[in-house]
Image (spheres, grey):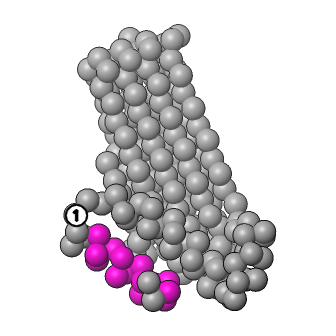
């Protein structure tokens, strides 16, 4: 599943997936761009019921200005899901002093032989990268826009539908003003 949230003032999203069959799998790639006062409320749940199941949730986004995000990610290993694995990873770039980022990971386990992982990288633009880009003639705003655009391009390149991908690229060009 690939989801990209770019322009709505308030976004409520999520899914619940049950991995019932042996070796069944689920992968989610979620991206978002929070500008202005946009708000994101996300709830994703992977319920492992079958043996040797696998889930992966990768969430990546940028929060600017006064935007906010609440992400709840649950990996639920139920009895009978031996040999299963669940991974949840979040990567958030904070580009404003007024942004609010909340992450609530949850791993539930009723089985012995399982592996559940949660990782989060949440932070501001690296000062060394910012210095490097500015020393090459970019303003701080242009450098931030370039990094933001690179993050969004990484997900939008995976859409797989030319017209839809062009719509996303046109929108990103408009909101970042980078002329790409």
Which range of residues does the magenta coloring cover? Answer: 165-178
- Mark 1 residue element: loop
Q: Please determine whether, in this image, residue 60 is positioned above or below residue 10.
A: above
Q: Please determine whether, in this image, residue 48 is positioned above or below residue 56.
A: above
Q: Position of residue 111 (x, y in %)?
A: 49, 13
Q: Nearer the viewer, residue 172 or 38?
A: 172
Q: Nearer the viewer, residue 105 or 159?
A: 159
Which residue is found at the position 51% from the left and 69% from the top? 150
Residue holding disc 1: 161
Q: Is residue 126 visible?
A: yes
Which residue is found at the position 63% from the left and 77% from the top? 144
Residue 28 lies in the magenta-colored region: no
Q: Position of residue 20 (x, y in %)?
A: 28, 22
Q: Is residue 67 visible?
A: no
In the drawing, does residue 126 fall left or right of residue 155? right
Which residue is found at the position 48% from the left and 47% from the top? 58
Q: Position of residue 116 (x, y in %)?
A: 54, 27
Q: Nearer the viewer, residue 166 or 136?
A: 136
Q: Please determine whether, in this image, residue 62 is positioned above or below residue 22.
A: below
Q: Residue furthest front?
A: 136
The secondary structure that dominates the magenta segment is: helix
Q: Please determine whether, in this image, residue 83 is positioned above or below residue 103.
A: above
Residue 176 lies in the magenta-colored region: yes
In the drawing, does residue 132 fall left or right of residue 57? right
Q: Position of residue 71 (x, y in %)?
A: 52, 52
């Amino acid at each position: 599943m690939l989801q990209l949230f770019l322009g709505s003032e308030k976004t409520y999203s999520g899914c619940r997936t049950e991995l019932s069959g042996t070796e069944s799998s689920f992968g989610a790639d979620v991206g978002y761009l929070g500008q202005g006062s946009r708000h994101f409320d996300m709830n994703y749940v992977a319920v492992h019921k079958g043996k040797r199941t696998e889930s992966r949730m990768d969430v990546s986004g940028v929060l600017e200005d006064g935007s906010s995000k609440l992400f709840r990610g649950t990996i639920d290993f139920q009895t009978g899901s031996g040999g299963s694995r669940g991974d949840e990873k979040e990567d958030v770039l904070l580009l404003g002093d007024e942004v609010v980022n909340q992450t609530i990971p949850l791993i539930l386990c009723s089985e012995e032989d399982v592996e559940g992982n949660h990782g989060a990288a949440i932070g501001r633009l690296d000062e060394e990268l910012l210095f490097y880009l500015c020393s090459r003639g970019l303003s701080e705003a242009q450098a931030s826009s370039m990094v933001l655009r690179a993050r969004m391009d990484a997900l939008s390149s995976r859409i797989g539908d030319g017209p839809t991908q062009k719509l996303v690229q046109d929108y990103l060009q408009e909101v970042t003003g980078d002329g790409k």
